[in-house]
Image (tube, rainbow, N blue to C red):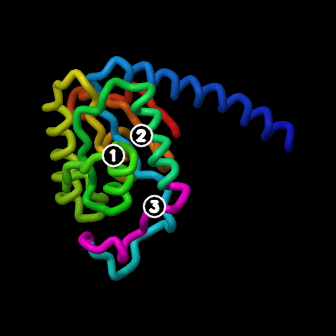
Amino acid sequence: MIRLALALFLLVVPVAAHATDAGWALLRDGGHVVLLRHAMVTGTSDPANFDIDNCGTQVNLSARGKQQASRIGALFAARAAPVERVLSSRYCRCLDTARIAFEAEPKLFAPLDLLKGDDAQNAAQIAGILKEIRAYSGSDNLVMVTHLENIIALTGVSPREGEAVVVEPQGDGLRVLGRVTF
């Protein structure tokens, strides 16, 4: 049983490394949109007294998450075309990921906030994100720091904390071009 698990692990690792290499190749070329899931956090869900304007009432980046965000920024600086713009959810874990990684104040973009409303509200958020992605035509990269639920709704993929998903518009939705894990 252990041998089987080890064999499966060894088969998956090269695929993940290849996916990351392909993602970096895209980002080196520039002109892409990146959906970045916030870095590692201290808990699993926001407390009952959640307040969007008070970081003390939210799940926040862990010490490892802050290190991960710093690593994300260093790798983007070393391996990717410049980042033209950073948009972020208003949640502190996303803002802190963006601030640490890209050493600049991100533009707040409420559609990137955690999807947790009714179906109509969620659809409006997704439409807002898609509109922003479709409108992007820069030669550098656009980074959008958001949450797992949003990325799943937009792409169908489930990124790890701190993982980047490179996308482009396709039909009514998005096509995943590559992924980068940190």
**Which residue is rendered at x = 31% and y = 59% of the image?**
114
Q: Type of residue at label 3? A: Leu
Viewer-proximal residue among 122 and 55? 55
In whole angstroms, how far apart are the C-alphas of marks 3 and 1?
A: 16 Å
Which quadrant would the N terminus be assigned to in this image?
A: top right
Q: Percent from the top left, x then y, of residue 11?
A: 70, 28
| Residue 146 appears left or right of 14 | left
The mark nearer the N terminus, 3 or 1, is: 3
**Which residue is rendered at x = 42% and y = 68% of the image?**
59
Q: Is residue 2 above or below residue 178?
A: below
Q: Which residue corresponds to mark 3?
A: 61
Q: Type of residue at label 1? A: Glu
Judged from the image, the secondary structure of the residue bearing numbered disc 2 is helix
Taking the magenta stretch, the answer to whether it contains residue 53 is yes
The part of the chain drawn in magenta is 52-65
Q: Quadrant of residue 102?
A: top left
Q: Which residue corresponds to mark 1?
A: 103
Viewer-proximal residue among 44 and 92? 92
Q: Type of residue at label 2? A: Gly
